[in-house]
Image: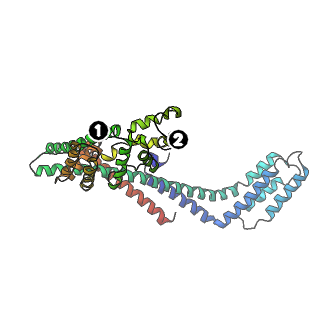
Amino acid sequence: MSTSETGADAGTALREARRRLADAESAVAEHGEADLERVRDALTRAEGLLDRYEDSATGTGDFQAYVEFQGEFADLVEGLPDDLPARDAFEAANGTIDQRRLSESDFAAAREHLAPARELTDLLSDREQAGRAVREAERDVERRIAVLDDRIADRERVLELGDAFDAASEHAGADGNGGADVDQRVADLRETVETYDGSVRDAFADFRREASARELLGFVDDTAHYPLVEFETPPDELLAYVEDHEVGTEPLPDLLEYADYSASKLGHYVDDPGAFRTRVPVHRTYLDRLSADPLTVGWPAPPAGELRALAGELVSVVAKFADESVVADARELRRAVTRDDYDRLRRVAVAEADLTDEERGKLESGAIAEELEAARAERERLREALEDADTDGT
């Protein structure tokens, strides 16, 4: 299991992997990399001959194969440089197979004689394996740092929310009010927002149910002039259809019901069933999704500047389909955002909405700050471990 998964000290694992790589590199340097590469090449060829001829050149096998094998192996050994490390291992292997009849045990003995050469080439393999281990350890460190980045960002978020709540409470205390007063003012602000959201949802539901499809889609199309009221613009062909056909004077729920009718039944309700089917049912998903959501504010409410601009547009847009009481609720939004303490109250609301009970408890106990400090310290150690690796050139 990788250190990034267990949360163990990935930095220690990286340093240990780098130490093993340094040892492996020293061993290669001691014998000479070029010499070791020559030994590996010779060993590869020798073992290749042993593997290729073992079945055919043993016992009562193919005599021609036996002759070829002995000749090729002897040529290989004779062609090796005199200064090749472990050359005597190849000579010993050649001596083992230089006899009139070969058995599987002779091939095994030849391989055994090659062991010193194999040990030398293992130094290259050990270095390669150690290099791979370092790269994997570095990836573990990077993955662990990514986990810590997320943890740090989360703990910072919680602390910021807690600070916002404390600042609002302290401001209330400076005014001679306590935390209970802050809670009440947040509750009042929430009631203003939720009263508007509820009334506009009800009003739009009535409008969607009772107004003609032509009027409803025309209203939605007109909201394009109000960029903060983010209705999806009606498809052009659908809008043109309800404007040009008599069925467009009927409420949207009726059109959606007609969309489920058979062709013969539909002919009793619309003047051109073919045109209806190519304009209305194909946009069923759009029509089903048409709701009051773009007209609502939501809780916690947006920052003062955003709500001020949105409320101004909502007053104008809502007046196009809702009665005066809903428009009055929209005006209350605009008045609420002019309060001097709006942003402070909103920050408290965001904190209350975003903080879990566990996070609140950890804030009060100081555990969040401790976790943040520990995560930052661990991340710093891991970054130093990576920098050390870069300095060492691994």
* Placement of 53 over or under 198, stated as above or below: below
Q: Nearer the viewer, residue 200 or 56?
A: 200
**133 on left or right of 234:** right
Disc assigned to residue 202: 1
Which amino acid lies under the numbered mark 2 shown in the image of this protein?
A: Gly
Q: Which residue is mark 2?
A: 274
* Placement of 36 over or under 171, stated as above or below: below
Which mark is first along the chain, 1 or 2? Answer: 1
Q: Are marks 2 and 1 in contact (CB under 8 Å)?
A: no
* Placement of 124 over or under 172, stated as above or below: below
Q: Residue 358 in the image: x percent, y percent? A: 29, 40
Q: Residue 192 in the image: x percent, y percent? A: 21, 44
Identify the residue at image location x=40%, y=50%: 233
Which amino acid lies under the numbered mark 1 shown in the image of this protein?
A: Asp
Identify the residue at image location x=81%, y=56%: 95
* Front tag of 2 and 1: 2
Q: Nearer the viewer, residue 222 or 98?
A: 222
Element type where label 2 sits in the image: helix
Give the class, few, some or many, for how many residues have Cα within 10 Å of label 2's Cα (few <14, many ≥20).
Answer: few
